[in-house]
Image (spheres, rainbow, N blue to C red):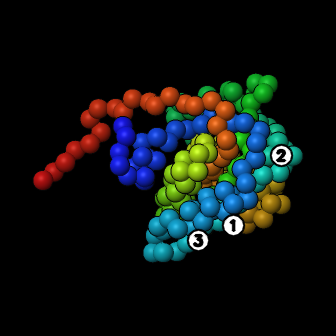
Amino acid sequence: MSLNNEVLNCIHERRSTRRFTERQISSEQLDTLLDAAIWAPSGGNNQSWLFTAIQKKSVLLHLNKLVCEGFQRWVPDDDYPTKHAMKKRSSQEGYNFYHNAPTLIIASNKPNYENAMADCSLALQNIFLAAQSLGLGSCYINQLHWLRHDPDVRAYLLEMGIPREHTICSSAAVGFIDKESPAPVRKEGTIQIIR
């Protein structure tokens, strides 16, 4: 659908990218994404979030190794199929939880704050739409949230400056698109209007 509105076009054209090139995004692009994040709404205007951007490849690869190891110890706490699929996939050679994106932005927040996840999710959506407007790909990443209590993963995140008292909400993988993702069909029956 082509609309005469830049924001609505971004919403309709944005896809979850799972194949990125190795090319790093520019400092200006990263600054733009992070600025978009902090302009998201937050409950009571708390702005208690922290966005940690990682671009150093060796750090990302080590974090991926810790995630793979953490998945082997982790027991999913519900029957969400993707959790079980990722746990299985993490033991396979070549698994990379952030899809080898050159930039990973981790959103963390206060754990005793009811709106922590909602605030960070709104900020990540701003990142995804800003990335789309800049010609970049992005993907919502859950794995660090699922492994937020893993001691090795948490210790490494602490080394990066993510406070021990913060909960890991979600992350955004960002980079240049190597392979476009097709548009998924929208499900019927997901809207109701009461007038």
Quadrant of the frame with the N terminus: top left
| Location of residue 148 in the rendering, given as x and y in whole percent from the top left corner | 68, 51
For image coordinates 78% across by 65% down, the residue present is: 161
Estimate the spatial distance between the alpha carbons at disc 1 and disc 3, rounded to whole Å.
12 Å
- State the residue in front, 150 or 140: 140
In which quadrant of the rendered view does residue 97 lie? top right
| Location of residue 136 in the rendering, given as x and y in whole percent from the top left corner | 61, 45
Secondary element at tag 1: loop
Res. 84 visible in picture: no
Q: Amino acid at mark 3?
A: Ser
Secondary element at tag 3: loop
For image coordinates 52% across by 57% down, the residue present is: 126
- State the residue in front, 52 or 91: 52
Of marks 1 and 3, which one's residue comes earlier in the chain? 3
Q: Amino acid at mark 1?
A: Glu
**Where does label 2 land, which residue?**
57
Of marks 2 and 3, which one's residue comes earlier in the chain? 3
For image coordinates 69% across by 36% down, the residue present is: 20
- State the residue in front, 152 or 14: 14
- State the residue in front, 69 or 34: 34
Disc assigned to residue 48: 3
Estimate the spatial distance between the alpha carbons at disc 2 and disc 3, rounded to whole Å.
28 Å
Mark closer to the observer (2, 3): 2
Check the image and name the residue furthest to the right. Answer: 58
20 above or below 131?
above
**Where does label 1 land, which residue?**
165
